[in-house]
Image: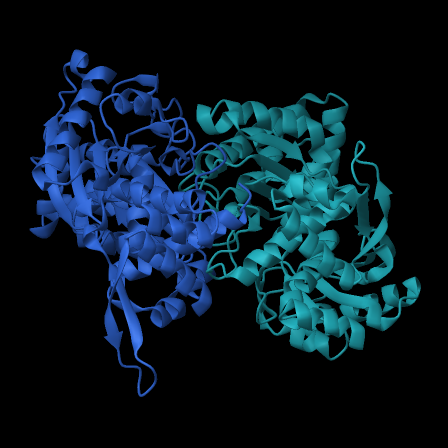
Chain colours: A blue, B cyan
Amino acid sequence: MKRTSRDIRTANRYGVLRHIVAESPVSRQEVAAATGLSLATVANLVGELLELGMLVEVGYEDSDGGRPRGLVAVNSSGGALIGVDVAETYVHVELFDLALTVLARADQELRPERPEENHPTKVVAHIAAAVASVVGQAGIAPDRVLGVGISMPGQVDREGGVSVFAPNWDWHDVPLLRMLADHIPYPLYLDNPLRACTVAEQWFGAARGRGDAVVVNLGTGVGAGLALGGALHRGVSNSAGEWGHTTLILDGRQCHCGNRGCVETYVGAPGIMRNLRELSPDSPLLRADDQTATIEALGRGLADGDPVAAQVVRDTARYLGAGLADLINLLNPEVIVLSSWVAAALGEGLLAEVREAVAGRALRRPLASTEIVLCPIPSNPVSLGAATFVLEGSLASVGLKHRRPTAARTRGASS
Amino acid sequence: MKRTSRDIRTANRYGVLRHIVAESPVSRQEVAAATGLSLATVANLVGELLELGMLVEVGYEDSDGGRPRGLVAVNSSGGALIGVDVAETYVHVELFDLALTVLARADQELRPERPEENHPTKVVAHIAAAVASVVGQAGIAPDRVLGVGISMPGQVDREGGVSVFAPNWDWHDVPLLRMLADHIPYPLYLDNPLRACTVAEQWFGAARGRGDAVVVNLGTGVGAGLALGGALHRGVSNSAGEWGHTTLILDGRQCHCGNRGCVETYVGAPGIMRNLRELSPDSPLLRADDQTATIEALGRGLADGDPVAAQVVRDTARYLGAGLADLINLLNPEVIVLSSWVAAALGEGLLAEVREAVAGRALRRPLASTEIVLCPIPSNPVSLGAATFVLEGSLASVGLKHRRPTAARTRGASS
């Protein structure tokens, strides 16, 4: 966990490229002002990224009578990034250009009710087929694909490329990247949806430019991605963020993790269904065992002024608000982002109730500096974040290929 | 919160000096190996610290037939650091040499039952008197005092030098450093006991050399200092760590913060007294309203095999274990340190019960990488940590005085 000068250089590359991706075209001076780095450092890093073909020079802008400033922009055709969102019922794959515009999509259906179809070899085949499909659709030369990022639910060992535990399918220690490498000829990066969403928020969403941010994922499961000091906090064994399994009510509801009273049992989709069932067992909003349909019905009910929907959202917000107040008191973040499909379905109605519940519980000083917002990313943040793992991986490896600036320059000339 | 190259250089100075303080005398090669920094970087930083008089060359060691390696050590007489621990009932001040050996101590009694004595001007006078006393006792020339670090309970604005809220005395927005500057001619640094203890653990205790550590303060109040990625996580308004005011039982015990069910109400000293009272209202271990005497009686009872003491500690460990499991699941730290007087009084007996309770609750993967230990610092960690604020402040300001290496060299020659 020690930060070496190479880590710092990588972090600075992230900062520079993040700003350029968001603001293209932009001058080095503007990037320096926005990132707090010196102009010399920015010029140096921009030089590296130009040479790698990730940026291009796009002309000049006036600078109030001074020397015209050179503008740089993302070289959208400088490479392709592939993001894979593996979920219980589907594999969703997107191919992006370097400006993170989607060029192609592919989906493969998974059937959780048929366990033989969820065997690792089957899932690997689905991922490989979808990846081949997006490359074919986009008509991209294979040597322009910088890599494939895979978001796999559960606990992952990202360095070893292993799915340590996937609760959906009860996978244990599946060497996913080794299996995928037999089918996919691109560099592979593995992590989980929580970290994919957090990285997506850092690069393209509400955490961009914020020192400390927490990305709260509200889906079937619940987690909190921690973007602290501008970097993703992974913890010593890459398992930080299991906020869903922190205690809200000691000895409360039984959780599948074996404990009782976990946050997830009150604010995950099944928890919200239970909140509804306890309030109104015969409510027409309840759709048997269908989480998605129930949450969507609640969202519509909320919009239509249904009093039961409003009360369930208020009850849920009371639990969620207490949990978020804990995060605010403990971490004192600048922003909390509510992400994933439950947050999207319940939207502004949930947000308003949550803000009120948090205001009633968090300590005054940290509360005053924290904003709570909905995820502003309009597309699937998981596949976007997975593709961003590739971008980060490419930026991190620059220092390995180009040890010294001189070597980097010659490489460009000789290749 | 952006990390500039100056922040990095400061963090590297911390790392180098921390290792030298702990291992003096030591070679640059050993420091490089221990910190992960390059030998060139270490040589450069050691050069700066030699020039400031914080280190001295102390000879050579053999290197298995190679060129003998120069050894450096902390120059203990290179300066003095003063640490001030302000508590409800006392002001405790220690003067340290640069090896962090205590050269002098002074105490001033405060009487919380007499509000007129807790007026800011009175407390300021007590601090100033104790600081003057330790400088006099140690016979230190004033120009060798590098500064005074003050640990003030409650919420502090460290940059503005303001005690934002001190619950003991109901202080609000007291400009403490401005008031102290009229009486104390040294650079002043302000923060709170939680951060003092955490910094002490990072420099001299169980968090040294660990990537991610949590220092849990168990006293009258409860908090969790977060040392993440080798740096203190302060949060966006320097109020991170209010773990005592996270919810363990929604709608549980009333807390003085206005909420219910906060961790502090179960594992802070008054919470432990309540656990005892609920178990055995007439227990002779209960000492009326005296927290300190009760906790000490519990500690002795535990050592003597008293079944009531054992059960109260088990009940407390169940609450504490649930709270620590939350920290493990959320942050995935390498070590959790139990600090402050309650942890010291209940010691190994509490630790054993807590480890068992945590093992029953935390998720398998993060649990496997977390160690839980008692604070190993034999002296008062608060005044030690407060003195360390001065050390860190001095190291951080090196870059400000010595903009360029050439300027730094000339300064030494001309002064």
- Which of the two residues, A396 or B169, is positioned nearer the viewer here? A396
Q: Could you tell me which residue is drawn at 18 percent across and 26 percent down?
A: A128
Instruction: Please identify the quadrant where the C terminus of chain A is shown.
Output: top left
Q: Is residue A238 left or right of residue B356?
A: left
The percent position of residue B176, horizontal first and vertical second, equals 65, 72
Q: How many marks?
A: 0
Q: Could you tell me which residue is drawn at 30 percent across and 18 percent down?
A: A171
Q: Could you tell me which residue is drawn at 52 percent across and 35 percent down?
A: B324
> Is any part of residue A413 visible from this angle?
yes
- Which of the two residues, A108 or B401, is positioned nearer the viewer here? B401
> Is any part of residue B91 visible from this angle?
no
Q: Is residue A157 left or right of residue A99?
A: right
Q: Is residue A308 left or right of residue B359?
A: left
- Residue B195 against residue B210 in the figure, above or below: below
- Which of the two residues, B298 or A110, is positioned nearer the viewer here? A110
Query: Looking at the image, which residue sits at the far top?
Result: A116
Query: Looking at the image, which residue sits at the far front?
Result: A414
Locate residue B277: give its quadrant. Answer: top right
Locate residue A289: give its quadrant. Answer: top left
- Which of the two residues, B116 or A215, is positioned nearer the viewer here? A215
Q: Is residue B13 left or right of residue B105?
A: left
The percent position of residue A93, horizontal first and vertical second, equals 17, 35
The percent position of residue B49, horizontal first and vertical second, equals 74, 59
The percent position of residue B106, horizontal first and vertical second, equals 85, 60
Q: Could you tell me which residue is drawn at 16 percent across and 15 percent down?
A: A117
